[in-house]
Image (cartoon, rainbow, N blue to C red):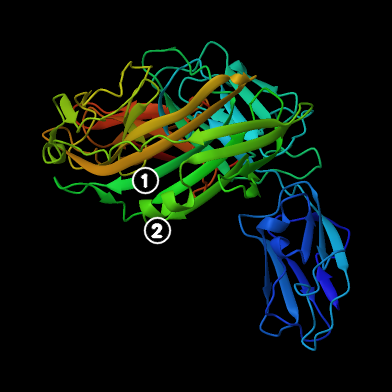
Amino acid sequence: MISVTPADGSEDVAISTPVVIVFDQDMNTTLAPFGALGNLAMSPANLAQTTLGTWGDDNRTLTLQPTFGPWPLNVTITWTLNPSGVNPFLALKSASGTQLATVSGSFSTGVGAPVLGSVSPGENAQAVPTNTPIVFRFNQAMKKSELPGGTPPTVLITGAGMDPANLTYQWAADGRSLTCTYVGGFPRSTVVSWALNPPGAPVPLESESGKPLASATYFGTFTTASTGECNVDPLATWGTYGVTRRGNYAQTSTANPVPDPEYEAPFAFTAVISSPALGAPVTAASLEFPDGTITNLTSFGAFSFFATFDTEEELLESYPDGVYTERFTQTGLPERVVPIQAGVEFPPVPKIANFTEAQSVPSTQPFVLRWEAFTGAGGDDFITLFIADEAGPVVFQAPNPCVPIELKPTDTSVVVPQNTLQTGRTYFAELMFAKSFLFTTNAFPTMYGFGFNFRSTRFPMKAEGGVGPADPAVLSNVAVGDNDRISFDLEGSPATAYKIQRADRLTATLWPEVGTATTDAAGKAEFEDGQALGSGPWFYRAVTP
């Protein structure tokens, strides 16, 4: 052997790095290293069964890499070729037939730079209860000594009518999640924008090892409900474990839905295990399949396994009914072992019954969207519906406890309120049926388990007879008053509320909202920024919801 990468004893190795071994002579490439053959041993356990060995065209270069995702994070990985006791017939050999002596090496995967794993409320979430906290979850422990602060702050949260003094911040004990609460509740019907490590933040968020979270990378928005507080999902901060099988379909006419062509492979199997926001974090996880094979789950904010297929038949052939056993460990707790019996039928493929009518919705009137029944639905099964506009934001969802809108699995219709859809816009909707084979909240503290067979159908919706999209706003007559506040005139569509956003440069990725300008019957309005001009330039734009 001439060389190996990563070198023996390497630390902080990226989890996507393969092991590359170069030999000093041509090798017999008819056999590749594999745990089942006994010519490859690895630690942690089970890695040898999920690691693929491939030979290069030069017959001297061997590459080892896991078949499902990258290496596990934050572990020491040991590999051994031709371990003690290997069958001579299956042992790795040179092209001349000389058996390779036992050779091994090890390396440690590093935490790398921290990554934002998830945020709640989700991007573009609508009708968010005003008393909902913002929870950021990271893939590793962060420094808790430096809370958001400075000018601009490390965590920037803005919205019309908000006072930064009302924001409070609390790190979880393990440093993996940060909860931001607006005392008294966010303003109603308000677009709330957030950004982590915005440009110019003097003290960036960073991991315990001192590696900063990427700047100007993580930002998003959500819209608060118009009715104030409502019952927040009691499981929103819990961890999860479970498996799902899903089929994605599309309906483009009154004919039956077909596998969705927007997906390269529209059928999927997923296993996921995520940490609770305020509980002991999950540190390792694995999944045992019905045939007894085991794979380690890969952590990207949550531990997960994902496989896709072209047809539902291929999905069920590879991941049939049977027992899928998830195992996971949490800091300071014994290993959890969860057998999940996947054995219920799939729900029917959702089909819109009044598809033609949904292509010409009278936007100034309520519209009843109808679908064919979810036959065989039980008490733990459910239906969800989302309607989003071309730009991405969700304009309607059911069920929605904050409106409130109820949607039972036995329902075959829902009322879309008037003025939800605007003339001239195409909307993309998704109706999903879910058949449950597991749902439990009492097996482990602050963790809930699930198992579902999903079928969803994506379909278009269009509106007519309502108010069309607003005209782009024109800003003019910019002036700086004696109070150092910028003002300008705005001209656009009559009687329209334009959201005014501001940034410190034209190429900014984040444009916080600083107010609203509502035009009169002639389409004109005036706006004055409530904050005095600083030392740098400011740029403004006006947008409509």
- Give x and y (percent) for residue 540: 44, 40
Residue farthest to the bottom, as pictured: 96
Among the 4 quarters of the image, the one containing residue 16: bottom right
Q: In this view, does 283 lie to the left or right of 367?
A: right
Task: Find out whether the residues at labels 1 and 2 contact each other: C-beta distance under 8 Å.
Answer: no
Amino acid identity at mark 1: Gly
Among the 4 quarters of the image, the one containing residue 382: top left
| Nearer to the camera, 390 or 254 | 254
Tell me the residue that label 2 is attached to.
264
SS category of the residue bearing label 2: loop
Residue 139 higher or lower than 260, as above or below: above
| Nearer to the camera, 102 or 460 | 102
SS category of the residue bearing label 1: strand
Tell me the residue that label 1 is attached to.
247
- Give x and y (percent) for residue 70: 66, 55
Residue lying at 70% horizontally and 80% vertically, measured from the top left: 29
Crowding near the residue tagged with mark 2, few <14, some 14–19, many ≥20 C-alpha atoms within 10 Å: few
| Nearer to the camera, 406 or 173 | 406
Dot in front, 1 or 2: 1
Crowding near the residue tagged with mark 1, few <14, some 14–19, many ≥20 C-alpha atoms within 10 Å: many
The quadrant the N terminus occupies is bottom right
Amino acid identity at mark 2: Glu
Residue lying at 37% horizontally and 51% vertically, measured from the top left: 312
Of the numbered discs 1 and 2, the one sitting upstream in the chain is 1
- Give x and y (percent) for residue 453: 41, 37
Among the 4 quarters of the image, the one containing residue 338: top right
